[in-house]
Amino acid sequence: MAQVMAQRFTGTPVKRAEDPRILTGRGRYVDDVTFPGMVHAAFVRSPLAHARVVSVDTSAAKAAPGVLAVYTGPEMEALIEPGPYGMAAMMNIWPPAHSLLATDKVRLVGDLVALVVAETRYLAEDAAELVEVEYDPLPAVMTAAQALDPESPLIFEDLGSNVLAGPKVTTYGDVDRVFARADRVVRATISQHRHQNVPMETRGAVVDYRKDSGEVEIWSANQGVALVATVLSARLGIPREKVRARAADVGGSFGLKIGAQREEVAIAAASRDLGRPVKWIEDRHEHLMAAGHAREETLEVEAAVTNDGDILGLKVGIVVDAGAYPGLGGMVTNIIEGMVPGPYKIDALSFSSTSVVTNKATYVAYRGPWAAETFVRERLVDLVARELGKDPLEIRRRNLARREDNRQMVTGRSLAGITAYESLEEVLGRIDLPAFRARQETARNEGRYLGFGVATYIEPAPGTRANGPLGAEQMRMELAEDGTVLVYTAQMPHGQSHETTLAQVVADNMGVPFEGVRILYGDSAVSPPGLTGGSRSATMAGGAALTTARLLRDKVLDVAAHLLEASRDDLRIENGSVLVAGVPARAMTLAEVVGALRQPGRLPEDVDTELKVENVYDGGTGGWSGGTHCAIVEVDLETGLVRIERYLVVEDCGEVINPAIVDGQIRGGVAQGIGAVLLERSAYDAEGNYLSSTFMDYLLPTSMEIPSIEVVHLEPVPLDPVVNFRGVGEGGMICTPAAVCNAIEDALAPFGVRVLEQHLPPARILELVGVIEPE
Amino acid sequence: MAERTIELTVNGEARTVVVEDRTTLADALREQCHLTGTHLGCEHGVCGACTVLLDGEAVRSCLLFAVQAAGSEVTTIEGLSPADGSLTTVQEAFRECHGLQCGFCTPGFVVSVTAFLAENPTPTDEEIREALSGNLCRCTGYQGIIKAVRLAAERLQPANAT
């Protein structure tokens, strides 16, 4: 059993260490960083979705006031090495080869054509308007169906088709036998629509190349400085040690801001060329149009079911619209494939996948990038119930794996420790369903339409050891002169509150006050390599904090035993001081311990007096997060508006480090899921014009649409002897669209509506019930 | 582009700044007054991150030209914050209620809420939601923010003042 530590901070809603600076306007976001002599960049972007670039005339722009340089595609290529950028660099996705700025053609509205650098952003934008580009338009490939049509033009000639990955077919279990045994097969084609991360801070960077030393320093909005440095090093062709990537406060990301992206590589090249620091801050129009979009997938599914409601097996065929440039869209299907059985007892799966390129923004990671698996499965469960005339809850109860089953997913992942079934039962214990059904009936008679929906999911956060390598988390810790514990984490927080949560864990395991811990991050010169994402932080960084703090504590006690001439077993660290059992007068503060080590001769020579530790945490036993969400909605058939009357989350993320922060993560994810269903869509017209490039067109949820979200935590099930914190960042977003859509379908049941898509704005609701004609 | 010199009061201090006619108030505050707590989230007046007080009234500094603020009194998030580093009642309520995560939208919310509670010290929940609907937050789902406004309103009641 784990050593029992005094837990003063872990598990309590400690107020955030981040807040005082942010609340008083003293945060440091990338646009707040300036360098002496800094100049500003603006990009010329394509107004066409697909076209050959015939000529780019930069003469007028170069002559404009305050302009230092204008770079075309070929000029930029001469300054850099070829290769991938952003997340594609992490996954080494290359080819198809493509240039940084357009050389031969543009592939989406918003594609980069030229870069202008001027004394101010205003002047850079003025000059960008003077760049004359002649295009030879090509037909745009705007849908996956068009991309798969061999008659369509090629977006990348080198690729030979518009298929980026696949078709790939994998079979798990005996699919033929299971489908032959089924009483019936329920079929549906279910889609997710294109929408996007939309952090409140757009992307941006400041790059300072020093001609004297050949060193480059970049400050950017990102989720991990190490990958930024790696990409810049590769693309600029300079040694990794000469690149220092930094970040302080980052204004949200949700999967978007990974690595150095195209724009950041381009301004770094310009900084080196000009010998001046260059800043680029993306505007919202650029961001919505070209920073990256997510989620556009269509899934054809078949479920082999018995008349009693057992789901025996699935056939799933997915096509991902990966957008214009290679990114996550080429490989996200692998995660969807592994996860689609979820917490259900499904014995056979056939999964086929294809990713295609289109003339739209590149597919990027967005909070639970594989969420299609939950959406399609949880919709399908309800569709099966409807077809069999049964209650969707009964289908879930029959088919959910229970913890005591100790099953594996048919795709291979161990389901050890899952609490999906318990979460469903807990939801049902908190909702008076018979009373709701009675109220629903009465309301229907009055022409009001209420609906109830649930959805259940699990999330590898980080998953169990049996699922393969979890990735290791490095951490360094040392005692400063004043006794403060300095913690160098690989995490790059951008809303996750690691300055607070990691300090809570360290304080408890080191025996110091919360204020006695400083979390340091965001500097590739000193931060261990890593990334914040994938709901890994709680387990991996939390586990690293816990185990590293104990190593440092042990080192301090070794040294203190000599200094205090006491048995090590009689010592403990409490509230920042080393105490000797039974002899309160002989206590030493940690600052005194550090100070004593500076005096020569205080300790025998063979004692290690370096109060520093480096540690790698491997994830331990790991585990799942998961839960069940429940939505009660009312659909207004005059306006098509959906009002969420109640939203309940029953959730298991293991041992909670800070309940306020955990609940905040869940609520934020649920709000994004609600936005995805009711409001948000990254829309194009048939020619490839982008239609959602302002906040008047791309609607984010406001305080008017998001209800109070009730969050209940299940009693944690310990899997690991030491670390049972599990990630919680993505779950809210993964589960919500299915719960809301299931509730809407329930509300519209009198009209025989089947919800086969995720985006249900008012007009679509009215189409589904036949109030207005479909477009 | 022609420049002109304007005078205004920023956070109680008389300032003279040289701006182009097209320079937004937000850019003048950030770049010339070095008050970077005012954030730009959309630059088209929807997200509210750039909210400041202009003669006591909450405005979007991305939609105003600096020249329109000539002769006026501007208060930014830095000006609302006590000089000793402590937090105002509204700021403290945001902290206690976990009303912020990444924090990029936060200064705009704090300024808007401060103006709102000055105007309506005893808001209903519905009024709070409506008052917040002009500021976008992508992280919190608003629940902590709504709770913070309620708590701040309560603490700001004269009977509760310390």
Image (cartoon, coloured by chain):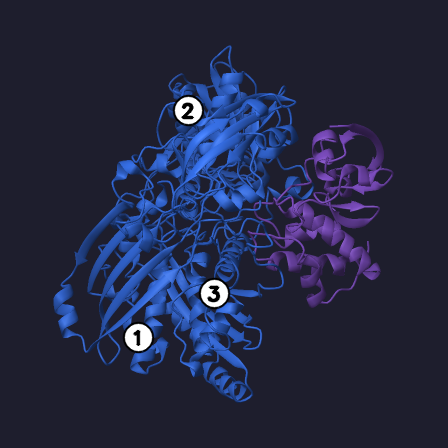
> Would residue A471 appear left or right of A213 to someone viewing this image?
left
The answer to whether residue B5 is visible is yes
Shade representing chain B: purple
Question: Which chain does blue denote in the image?
Answer: A
Number of marks: 3
Q: Which residue is mark 3?
A: A649
Residue at the image point whose x is 51% and y is 10% from the top: A212
> Which one is nearer the viewer's eye here, A678 or B68?
B68
Amino acid on which disc 2 is placed: Pro
Q: Which residue is mark 1?
A: A384
> Would residue A707 appear left or right of A558 to someone viewing this image?
right
Against A447, is A606 above or below? above
Local secondary structure at mark 1: helix
Q: Chain of mark 1?
A: A
x, y percentage for residue B28?
A: 73, 34
Identify the image quadrant of residue A316. Answer: bottom left
x, y percentage for residue A489?
A: 46, 35
Residue at the image point whose x is 64% and y is 50% from the top: B47
x, y percentage for residue A597?
A: 50, 20
Amino acid on which disc 1 is placed: Val
x, y percentage for residue A656?
A: 47, 54
Q: Chain of mark 2?
A: A
The answer to whether residue A715 is visible is no
